[in-house]
Image (tube, grey):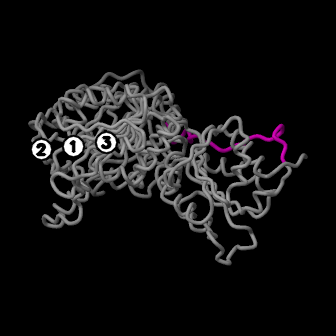
Amino acid sequence: MPRMPAMDAAVKILEDEGVDFVFGIPGSNVNAFYNSLSRSKKIKHLIARHEEGASHAADGWARATGKVGVCVGTSGPAGTNFITGLYAAQADSIPIIAITGQHVRAMEGKEGFQAMDISVVAKPVTKKTYYVRDPEQIPWVFREAFRIAKEGRPGPVLIDLPIDVQRGECHFDPEIDSPLPYLTPAPDLRRIERAVQMLLEAENPVLLMGGGCIISGACEAFVKLAEHLQIPVCITSMAKGGIPANHPLFAGEVGIQCNQLSGNRVFLESDLVLGVGCRFADRHTGTLDVYTKGRRFIHVDIDPYQIGRIVPCELGIVSDAKLACEALLASAQSATPPRSPNARVRRIPELRRELARRVDYDQTPIKPMRVYKEINEFFDPETIFVTCIGNHQIWANQLMDIYKPGHFIFAGGAGPLGWDLPAAIGVKLAKPDKLVVNVTGDFGFPFCGEELAMAVQYNVPVVVIIVNNGYMSLIRQNQKYVYNGLNYEVSLWYNDANLIDFVKWAEAFGAYGERVTNPDLLKAAFRRAVESNRPAIIDVIVERDTDVAMGNSLDAIREFEPLPERVPALR
C-alpha cells in the first residue's frame, strides 16, 4: 500500500465523496490541510468572514445538494464558532462535517495557545466527534465521518486534527478506496399494510408531511399516495413546498406560529394522522392535549427514538421516508382502486381561499404582509427562498406560495439569527441556475451580514430582502402580550429617522443596494436587484408594530388583523 501525506488522503476522500465546495478560514493550526486542499482540481474553497458563517454555508449547500457539506477552521475559537452551525444542522437533520485544526498532541490538556478540546465541546451537537491521534487513522476517520453523517437520521460530525497529525503520512491508495456503505432502512411490510388499512377505515384521515420527506426525496411518492386515496395533506414548516401550494389536496401548514388557517382547521377535524419524517416539534404541535385529542397517530421516521417520544402513536414504522412512501403507495394500490374525493376533500381548495390571510394592504409605511404578496407575484416557482427566524420568517411560512420541494429552506429547529445569508450562499453555489432569495429581518441580518463579503468576492448573486421594522419584532410581540405591554430593549432605531443604512452596507461590500418605502415600488426594486446580477440588498421599510398571528394551541391562534368570515366545518 503506497504512503502519502495524510492531508492529501483526506482531500482525495472529500473529492471522492462528492464535495465540490468547502467553506472555511485558514489558520496556522490547519494550514497543513489547506496546503493539500490548494492542490485539488475538484474542490473550490470559499473564505468566510466568520467560522459560524462557514458552517451555515456548508449547511445550505448540503440542504440544496443532498450531499455532505464541509466547513474548515483552525483551533480554539474557530471550533467554538462552529458550535451554532453544528447545532442548527443537528436540529434539522443536515449532514455536514466540520474540520478543525488543533495544537500538537503533546499540548493536549496543557492549555496551549488556542488549544482546547473541541471534540468534547461539540459532542452534544453532533452525531460523532473525532480527536485524531495518528496519521494512519485519517482515511478511516474521514470515510466513517461521511458514513455517519449520512446514515439513519442525517447530522453533523466534527473531525479535530492536531497539526503534527496533519503533517504526517499514512497508507492510502485512492485506486482501491471507496465510500463506506451505509444502511437505508426499509419498512416492515406488515406495518405498511396495517397503516393502509387504518387509513382506509378512518372517516377523516390526514397525511402529515414532515421535513424528512424533502431530505429523503419522498415527496413525489407521498403526493401520489394522497392522490390515490384522496386524503388531505397537511405539512410541517420544514416540509413547505413538498406539495405544490395549489394542489387540490393541500390543506395547509399546521402550527402555532408557522401555520395556515386551513391547515389547522383540517388537522383539527381529523381522526387519524399519518405523519412521515416529522419530529412533532413544539412550534408545530402547541399544547399537546389539543393536538392529540380525538385522533390516532401513525408515525414513520428513520430514527426509532422519535417514534412515541412526543406524541403517542398507535403504529410506528421505522424507515427511510422515501422507501416508506413508496411501500405505502404500492400497498394502497393493491388494496383499493383510485378513490374519488368526498365532499370534505373537494372543499379544500375553496377552504384555502376563504381562510387565506389578507395581504392586499396599500398603506405607507408598508404593511409587512404586502411584501409577501409582492414576493409571490414577482418571483416564479423556480425561485429558491432562504429564511431564518423571526416574524419575517413566520409571515413567510404563513403567506408565501411554494410549489417545489427544496425551494423553501430555513433553520427550523435551532433558529440561529444570521443563518440565512451564508446558507443562501451555499444554496446558490449548489444551484447556480436558480434564483436564490434570502428573506430576512433587520435584526437577524447583521449577525452574519459580514458574509456578504464572501458573496461579493466569489460573485455569488443572492438577493437579500430585508423586512425592516426597526424591532426585534418577535421578541417585542412576546413582551407586549406576555409581559403586560413591556417594550424593553427591543427597538433598533435610534430615533424615528436613524436606522442602519443597509443600502450603504451593501455598497460598502460592493453589492447592489436599494431602499423601498412605497409598496407599489417593490416589484421594480426586486427586478433591479435580480438584473444587477450580483449580490443585492433590498431594504423594505415596513410598519413597525404589526403583529403576526400565533397562539399556544392549534385551536387558539390569535389573529391581529381582520379575518375572512368563518366558514362551516368540513364535516
Q: Secondary structure at mark 2?
A: loop
As drawn, 213 above or below 347: below
Q: Choose top left, top right, bottom left or bottom right for residue 447.
A: bottom left
What residue is shown with label 3?
A: 503
Which structural element holds mark 3? helix
Residue 424 position in % (x across, y down): 44, 40
Q: Type of residue at label 2?
A: Glu
Q: Horizontal and vertical percent for residue 213? A: 47, 38
Q: For the point 13% across and 66% down, which residue is it?
A: 484
- Of residue 29 and residue 457, the one placed in the foreground of this image is 457
In the figure, is residue 243 to the left or right of 97? Answer: left
Up/down of 141 relative to 76, above or below = above
Residue ID for mark 1? 541
Q: Amino acid at mark 3?
A: Val
> Answer yes or no: do the residues labelled 3 and 1 have beta carbons within 8 Å?
no
Q: Is residue 463 magenta?
A: no
Are there few (<14), some (14-19), or many (20+) residues within 10 Å of tag 3? some
Residue 40, how many percent across, how many down? 71, 39
Query: What range of the chain is rendered magenta?
Result: 172-193
